[in-house]
Amino acid sequence: MANPIVRSRRSAWAFLIVVGVATVLVCLLFMTKSVTVKLLPFDNKSELAVVVDLPEGATLEDTERTLFSIAGVARQLPEIRSIETYAGTPAPFNFNGLVRHYYVRELPELGELHLNLAPRGDRARSSHAIALDLRARLKTIVLPTGTVARVVEVPPVMATLLAEVYGPSSMERRAVVAELKKLFASVPYIVDIDDSIGQPRPRLRISIDQDRLEFFGVEQRDVYDTIAALFGGTAVGYSHRGEGRNPIEIVVRLPKRDLSWSELLASTPVAANSVPGNKTVVELGDVVRVTKELGSPTIFRRDGRFADMVMAELAGAFEAPIYGILDVNKRIEAHNWGAPSSPTIRFHGQPEDESKPAVLWDGEWEITYVTFRDMGAAFAIAIVGIYILVVAQFGSFKLPLVILTPIPLTLIGIVLGHWLFGAPFTATSMIGFIALAGIIVRNSILLVDFIRHGAGQGKALREVLLEAGAVRFKPILLTALAAMIGAATILLDPIFQGLAISLLFGLASSTLLTVLVIPAIYVVLRDADGVTA
């Protein structure tokens, strides 16, 4: 196989050009999105969660009814074994819930479903496939207006697609958020869209009518005490449980269904004792004014700066945040923003100038950016370290470049392997690519060392190259096969599949090409006359 390649410099050049073009072409699969990039692969979990946010001010009963309707749809999935509902109280949270702050979900309009799945061996579909099916089924349910139901999976971030909006004022930020949600909704594979603003919570304002208070001779303190007892309850003692456990406070309070303002609460008696010898009572409604209004919106800060957020998940054609970000960015640039000026787009770091709106992409993208940046830096350091080591070994600054040349050849097998399996290029895939650098350099050193020793015996260059390939191919192949057999055991693992594909296909392509590329490079660089070394 090597003989036609090393026959002449022209054939060697042609082979190297073909290999270089092939490397570039397979990398174009990233550009065409035939091979997608995703940092965190979907694991095959034994549970799923559905997080439900009703409009602010919704009752606990409304939340329960919504959860029950969603649970009715979830029961249609054959993989579901049991369902737990939590309305107005946080569910037991895992690491994902800890990062997403689910432990603070204690308002009546907040609910969560825990779906416990069958063991992995008893179901054909992965938890991610079940989540996609469930998300599609939830679209058929008529939920209360303003309700957002999200199917939660990995990654452990606030949301897979998260846009933080900064700006000079709350009005401008909220205007940008409203437009940004429309742009999110225009992308077909962006789902479960929500924001941090929500809807203003209804608020009951009870204010004292001072004129009527003086007319009836009622003390303000008595009115405050009555209101506090009605809506907050009155502690009457403690229940001691013994055994060193903390006592339980005993509180007398109205049931939640009676806490809305009504004639019953308005008729609550209030003592009127300001006139000596004339103790009487008046109704609470006679000395207070009650109005209903909208409360203040929730205020969020990140690192001391005001920010509002638009959250979403991805399902369908693409499930990595980079593709959603690119599509939304195109729509941001083409959108007619009108009153709020077009926001600037940032991929990392908060904006220094908050005099105009800005959109900072966060969520899984931030982890992707930081991880691949750090891993790329680590890979560069590893390459420099290998270069220095080889320079010290062979005493040449050019020869290490020849030895390092086959490293990119692993991309041919890695990218094609991901394309064949329909698997995204993940962080574990990147780890496999970095690990292959050391293996490929070892193979190159074996060939180069043999060629150097053979060339010193006065043999013709082509003879030395062919002999080096024939002698060294067996240990190179055995090393590659041993690593490939070990990688095959994790090929079906959802987390480490990218690592297995990188090792299997990267080793297959680089092992076959290294024993051909190194001789071809030698012919191009050293065989000036085409005859001797």
Image (spheres, grey):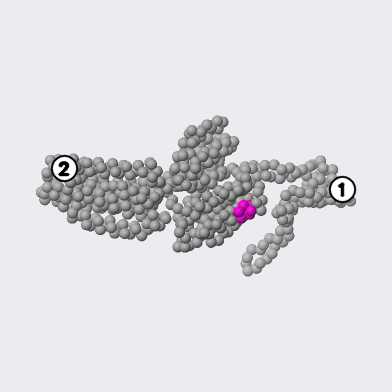
* Residue shown at 54% from the left, 39% from the top: 182
Residue extending furthest right?
277
**Secondary element type, mark 2:** loop
Name the spot of residue 492 as percent of width and height, x first.
39, 57
Q: Earlier in the sequence, mark 2 or mark 1?
A: 2
In this rendering, is residue 414 above or below 350? below
Residue 182, visible in the rendered structure: yes
What's under tag 2, amino acid-wise? Ser
Residue 206: image tag = none
What's under tag 1, amino acid-wise? Val
* Residue shown at 56% from the left, 43% from the top: 195
**Secondary element type, mark 1:** loop
Residue marked by disc 2 = 8
Which range is magenta? 63-69
Residue 100, visible in the rendered structure: no
Q: Quadrant of residue 16?
A: top left
Residue marked by disc 1 = 275
Position of 7 with respect to 276 (left or right) is left
Gap between marks 2 and 1, in whole Å?
119 Å
